[in-house]
């Protein structure tokens, strides 16, 4: 169905008004001859009807006008724009030369797009990709570290079996090492679950005897709170008042970390 020229003109004007980018028609000096709704909302009286007022650096538009005059069009992938409220935002700019017949004041078409959301989405995507890469790397490190812990655990358990009952002090130290390794292995497993390297799901069967866990913590941290402090001339005495056989629904290693 043919469309008469007046209807076509009205349609084009409506399209121009509602394009979701800032669109303006400029004269040879960068003055605004016509602007759509979006561009109009960014303009302020202080700009004096000149498009360069939309740019944090007015020289950006001047360069684009010169390049468009010479090459037909020019583009700035990203620059800083500013609206009537003083809001600064990242913008993509296209300026095209308009060679209209006759002596028209119209010389350029300006398209200014707010790319703040796109830029934010791009940054979020990049951050997500970095985290995914970090997770993959952490999963690999956790696997290797777990192998090292198992080697330490195996040798500690062998030494424990080879020592006589008379070596109670050494056996106690080895037991502390063994417990620390087991706690480390549990932490590594949680890291593997977090990174997707271990799909194991807790069945809610963890149970810790509180007084035993507290005793383990004191033994494991003894070098820090006892030996170091005594070297400084400070005597530390721990008094425990714990209910026997009181349990908590938590993994023992998690409890010891609290």
Image (cartoon, rainbow, N blue to C red):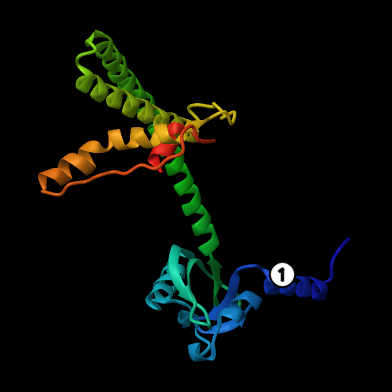
Q: Give me the residue at 23% from left, 43% from top.
A: 225
Given the current orientation, which residue lies at the most extreme right position? Answer: 1
Q: Quadrant of the N terminus?
A: bottom right
In the displayed structure, 208 sits above or below 90; it is: above
Residue bearing the label numbered 1: 15
Q: Residue 135's spot in the image, x, y percent?
A: 43, 36
Q: Position of residue 126 (x, y in %)?
A: 46, 47
Can you tell which quarter of the image residue 57 is in? bottom left
Horizontal side, residue 173 vs residue 121: left or right? left
Residue closer to the observer: 232 or 256: 232
Above or below 30: residue 241 = above
User: What quarter of the picture does the C terminus occupy?
Assistant: top left
Q: Nearer the viewer, residue 84 or 73?
A: 84
Residue 135 visible? The answer is no
Residue 185 relative to residue 206: left or right: left
Front residue of 99/155: it is 155
Within-10-Å neighbours for mark 1: few <14, some 14–19, many 20+: few
Residue 66, percent from left and from top: 41, 72
Q: Residue at x 78, y 70 (%)?
A: 8
In the figure, is residue 209 to the left or right of 7?
Answer: left
Report which quarter residue 237 is drawn in.
top left
């Amino acid at each position: 169905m043919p469309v008469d020229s007046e209807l076509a003109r009205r349609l084009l004007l409506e399209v121009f008004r509602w394009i979701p980018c800032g669109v303006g028609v400029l004269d040879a000096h960068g003055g605004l001859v016509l602007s759509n709704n979006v561009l109009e909302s960014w303009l302020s009286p202080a700009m004096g009807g000149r498009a360069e007022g939309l740019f944090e650096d007015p020289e950006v538009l001047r360069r684009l006008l010169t390049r468009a005059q010479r090459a037909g069009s020019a583009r700035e992938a990203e620059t800083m724009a500013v609206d009537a409220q003083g809001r600064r935002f990242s913008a993509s700019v296209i300026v095209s030369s308009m060679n209209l017949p006759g002596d028209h004041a119209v010389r350029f078409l300006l398209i200014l797009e707010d790319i703040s959301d796109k830029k934010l989405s791009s940054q979020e995507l990049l951050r997500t990709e970095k985290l995914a890469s970090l997770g993959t790397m952490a999963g690999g490190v956790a696997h290797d570290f777990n192998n090292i812990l198992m080697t330490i655990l195996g040798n500690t358990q062998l030494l424990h079996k080879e020592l006589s009952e008379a070596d109670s002090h050494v056996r106690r130290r080895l037991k502390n090492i063994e417990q620390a390794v087991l706690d480390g292995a549990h932490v590594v497993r949680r890291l593997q679950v977090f990174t997707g390297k271990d799909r194991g799901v807790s069945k809610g069967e963890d149970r810790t005897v509180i007084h035993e866990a507290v005793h383990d913590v004191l033994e494991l941290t003894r070098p820090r709170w006892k030996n170091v402090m005594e070297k400084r001339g400070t005597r530390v005495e721990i008094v425990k008042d714990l209910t026997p056989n009181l349990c908590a629904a938590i993994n023992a290693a998690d409890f010891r970390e609290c």
